[in-house]
Amino acid sequence: MNENILKYIPGIDAAQSITTIDAEQLTPKMFKEYFVSNNRPCLIKGAIKHWPAIKKWRDPDYLKAKCGDSPITYYPHMNYDHTDNMKVDETVKPFSFVLDILCHPSSGITSAPSLMFDKPPFLALAKDVAGFSFLPSPPKPILYPASRSFMYKGAGTGWHYHFVDETLMCQVIGSKKVGLLPPDTETDNIVYDAFTTDAYLSNSDCFDPMNASKLKPMLAVVEPGDALYIPPFWWHGVETIGSSFGITIANCWRSPLHVMGDLSFPTVRKIWKKSLTRPNKRTPIVLALGISSLLMQSVRFIFNSRARETKNAVEKGQSL
């Protein structure tokens, strides 16, 4: 299967650039209130330039010394969204063996995804990941690991979305080009079947020609030291720039309550529908979170309405 992750996406050639901000200018309050609370992606330049990993992980011998020969899974292809495609030629080998493949100049596309930092052997690398000035105390994620690495050589990641938790995609080694699509109903209707079956990788005609022009993709180039904030529900596909060895770190944390249950997102509506029409042991949890989220959204609406009224009154010089 061809690995044209961005090539056939309608409108990608005219994609808008994502909002970009320097990490030194991004305060915790700004990041939380403007970006996270409003489900807005952004590219943060220099977000992890202070991490020891930026320098240390360029040395394969350092990585081998820290992680030894523990077995890991790798694949000779990109990271697919469809499970059957992903498992093709799945192989387990010692970490040092896989690292040699990743670093060898003549080897082909290789992916060693989801190496967890919360347990051995990769726990030894956790101290090289030094956190973020604009995200000082992130709450624990609900589903995804708090921190995991993707080691790769020329291996991108197919279009997908995260249905829970916030993500900072951090580039330690190598650069990537990331396409994003907003989590609205119109976009979901156009891309869902093509993305979840990986059909778009080899078929440029898989999108409805009557509606494909309505897609409004965004693009970001993530370089070493940068982090891309990817909110939940946003579709995104990732291509590598070049074919050299690279490392990406995904740091995740729990989404704000009002975002998790926002019914304006088609993914949230699907989760609710599935929980109500096909009840299971998770249904009470989904309903509890959903109701709590709706209450929080109501509180935010009232608070924001009053804040706008106050701002307008002040601007008009009225007494309150």
Image (cartoon, grey):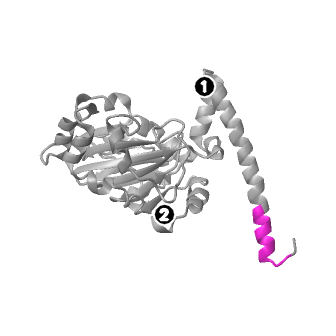
Residue type for callout 1: Arg
Which part of the image, by quadrant, shows the C terminus? bottom right
Q: CA distance from mark 2 to mark 1?
A: 36 Å
Residue 107 lies in quadrant: top left
From the viewer's side, name the closer residue of 294 and 145. 145
Residue 152 lies in quadrant: top left
Alpha-carbon neighbours of circle 1 within 10 Å: few (<14), some, or many (≥20)?
few
Q: Which residues are magenta?
A: 307-318
Residue 241 in the image: x percent, y percent? Answer: 27, 55
Which element carries disc 2, helix, strand or loop? Answer: loop
Residue type for callout 2: Thr
* Residue at the right extreme of this rendering: 319
Which element carries disc 1, helix, strand or loop? Answer: loop
Is there any visible trace of residue 89 in the rendered image?
no
Residue 283 lies in quadrant: top right
Residue 268 in the image: x percent, y percent? Answer: 60, 38
Q: Which mark is residue 282?
A: 1
**How many numbered discs sit on the rendered protein?**
2
Of the two numbered discs 2 and 1 on the same chain, state the one appearing first in sequence: 2
Residue 31 sits inside the magenta stretch:
no
Residue 164 in the image: x percent, y percent? Answer: 54, 40
**Residue for badge 2:** 19
* Residue at the bottom extreme of this rendering: 317
